[in-house]
Amino acid sequence: MEGDQETNVYTLVARKPSFDLPTACPNCLPAYIYLKLAQLPFELAFNSTFPDSDELPYFESDTYVAYNNEDGGVIEKLKKDGIVNLDSQLQSLSDYLSLKALIVSWLEEALTYEIWVGTEGISTSKIYYSDLPWVISKVLFYKQTYLAKNRLGITKENAEQREKQIYKRASEAYEALSTRLGEQKFLFEDRPSSLDAFLLSHILFIIQALPVSSFKFHQYISQLWVYQVEFSLRTI
């Protein structure tokens, strides 16, 4: 399908923008940046009908649809189906899987914790529930918080221990990724990848959507990283 890119009309359907981000959803932003890094022309549309749907974001073109809850997410689905694959020559590299574990596992885990538990959902209203009645938004918030704790394996008995473990892993991931990047534009020299999309969206979301006072990892995001994010986004 890559040969039909110039004739097809592609649309990424995401949650609405906020915090000066094209989409404020931490699950949608990586897909948006991935398509930008791939220089694939697409339209951005918004869907607020089902604010807690795990189908968002989804990518569509004619009869083709890639949902976020299929095949490991939208980006993985686009790669598997041959729509756009930035990682085709990188996945065989020895450090690809280790970097993926740091970003897609440890940092995603930390961000999920901070959004739903660490900050007690301070940003979630603007992302998911601002168009809903207060009572419904509260019900959905408690539901998603419960699901997040389940995914993270958090119970009353191990809550403090899991928090320390999550923050420790994230700190180690930041240090390793900072060393890896150095002054490079992307993780694999000048070649963008899906991992760059996840990392860029992670940093952007922290900077824009989470208050400095409530997020323990702001100290690890050096000014150099901020410049790298801004430079990378200006070039896509």
Image (spheres, grey):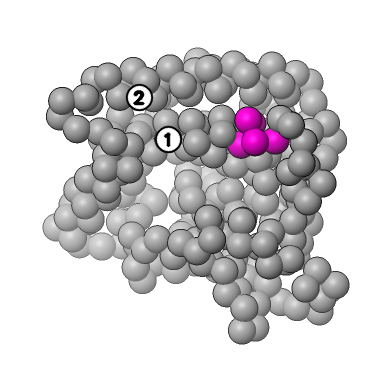
Residue 156 or residue 18, whichever sits in front: 156
User: x, y (%) of residue 93?
Assistant: 77, 36
Vertical comparison of 53 with 162: above or below: below
| Foreground of the two, 29 or 134 | 29
At 53% from the left and 57% from the top, the residue drawn is: 73
What residue is pinned by disc 1? 109
- Dot 2 or dot 1: first in sequence order is 1
Q: Dot 1: few (<14), some (14–19), or many (≥20) neighbours within 10 Å? A: some
Name the mark on residue 200: none
Q: Could one spot residue 204 in this view of the protein?
A: no
Q: Position of residue 50 (x, y in %)?
A: 34, 68
Q: Residue at x 78, y 21 (%)?
A: 183
Indicate yes or no whether the magenta region holds residue 189: no
Mark 2 packing: few (<14 Cα in 10 Å), some, or many (20+)? Answer: some
Q: CA distance from mark 2 to mark 1?
A: 17 Å
Q: Which mark is residue 214?
A: 2
Q: Are marks 2 and 1 in contact (CB under 8 Å)?
A: no
Q: Residue at x 73, y 66 (%)?
A: 83
Question: Residue most toward the bottom?
Answer: 63
* Residue 65 position within the rendered picture, expressed as x and y whole percent measured from the top left: 57, 74
Measured from the top left, where is residue 77 in percent x and y? 61, 62
In what element is the residue under mark 2? Answer: helix
Q: Which residues are magenta?
A: 96-100
Q: Nearer the viewer, residue 31 or 75?
A: 75
Q: Is residue 99 magenta?
A: yes
Disc 1 is placed on an element classified as helix
**Residue at image coords 14%, 58%:** 135
The chief SS type of the magenta part is helix
Q: Is residue 137 above or below residue 168?
A: below
